Image (tube, rainbow, N blue to C red):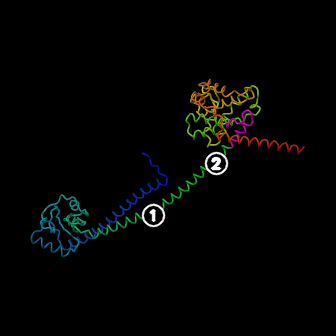
Amino acid sequence: MRKIELSLIQKFALSSALVLIFLGWGVGTFTTRSLEKQLVLSTQDYISRLIGDVLHSHYRPEEFLTPKLNDDYRNFQEKLYTHLPLPNAVGIKIYNPAGTIIWSDIPELVGKNFLGDLYLQKALKGELKAVITNIPPNKYPVLTLYLPIRYPGSPSVQGVFTIYQNFQTIYQKIREGQRTIWLVTAGGFLLLYLALYGIVRTATHTITEQTVNLRRSAQQLEEAYVDTIRVLAAAIDAKDPYTSGHSSRIAKYARLVAQKLGFSSQRIRELEKACLFHDIGKIMIPEQVLRKPGKLTPEEIALVKQHPIVGANIIGMANSLSRYVPIVRYHQERYDGTGYPDGLKGDEIPLEAQIIALIDSYDAMITDRPYRKAMTPREAKEEIRRQRGIQFHPRLVDAFLSIPEDEFNRRSDVERRLMELERRHLTERRTGKERRSKNSLEKS
């Protein structure tokens, strides 16, 4: 199954939406519960004060001790309904301190004990309790109030007055308030979300544009640096007429070998660039050493062996080219470990560096040098074959020898560009010499 990748703005939109929904739910729930609690408390306070005033004014404490039957029931009821106007009451129970009902609007309950009721137990201890319930067959919410009966000067509770209040009207107000709170909360958080989304989207767009521009600038800088290195490589090749076009040929041959090895197109392009850079360190070697027809002195040999290190240092000055540093540094190493500058062997040497080492040797064999004539391509390939597993990686030798001869004669785009750079460099040198000669004649 393909994994879905979200952009930065999509991740923000999703995460912020979830956070704001959760916060909105929390704020809405807290606010509506606070509203409901406040309305219950205000209703509870009003009814408890009303009932307390009626009981204290019209009933004695001893009247709450025994159940009311027959005439006592009717007399108690008449006095209660006369002095206690509760139009929304749907039920009343009055308990004595033992938890027995002494009077109820349902006569059959009088005399029964409900001490097992937890709310009743707490009310008998002096706690005022309020509970919202739905009592069948009523289809509306009922507020049940457990009101402790206390008289001034008495430390104990004389009983509990329980009233079942129709809470429909108040409950509707609560629900209307809740809907208003939810709508306001949702609207507020929606506006906050849209504002944050707009800010982040604008910022993301700006950052994306800046990133693209930075990458473009970095690419342009790298291309400019690469062109500079190419010019230097062409200049180095031009210092020695025997190696003219050397870097471009190395790039072409290396591409053929890399294709045989199954390199990706990106890796092949990287290898071609490395080929152009591989001898950049020779810029520090004097021309007389490069063109010397005879044997080099130990000091001159030591100087020549420094060119991979110097080249790697030059390339390493540009962070964008740092990936080429190992290739440039190790392109003179040998498979058997007898190369330079670090004496690496086998797979310790980067494969790209080993490719350049093989191609470098082949190109040196088939070109004239001050100290010897060029070999034929057949002779050079036989020498490459003899060095299989000694100087060169066996796998690279096999790949190189499998390339048809006509492939070597085709010019690549890289080679054509390098040759153009070389011609431009030689033209500039020739023009410079002519200008200096003209200036010298004018002065004389």
Q: Residue 322: which quarter of the image?
A: top right
Which element carries disc 1, helix, strand or loop?
helix
Which residue is under mark 2? 220
Q: Residue 174: which quarter of the image?
A: bottom left
Q: Residue furthest top?
A: 386
Q: Residue furthest left?
A: 70
Question: Is 378 located above or below residue 109 in the figure?
Answer: above
Q: Decide whether the magenta segment is chiefly helix, strand or loop.
A: helix
Residue 363 in picture, x, y percent from top left: 67, 31
Which residue is under mark 1? 191
Residue 72 in picture, x, y percent from top left: 11, 71
Residue type at mark 1: give it.
Leu
* In the image: residue 109, left or right of residue 377: left
Residue 424 in picture, x, y percent from top left: 74, 43
The Cα atoms of the two marked residues, 2 and 1, are separated by 43 Å
Magenta highlight on residue 233: yes
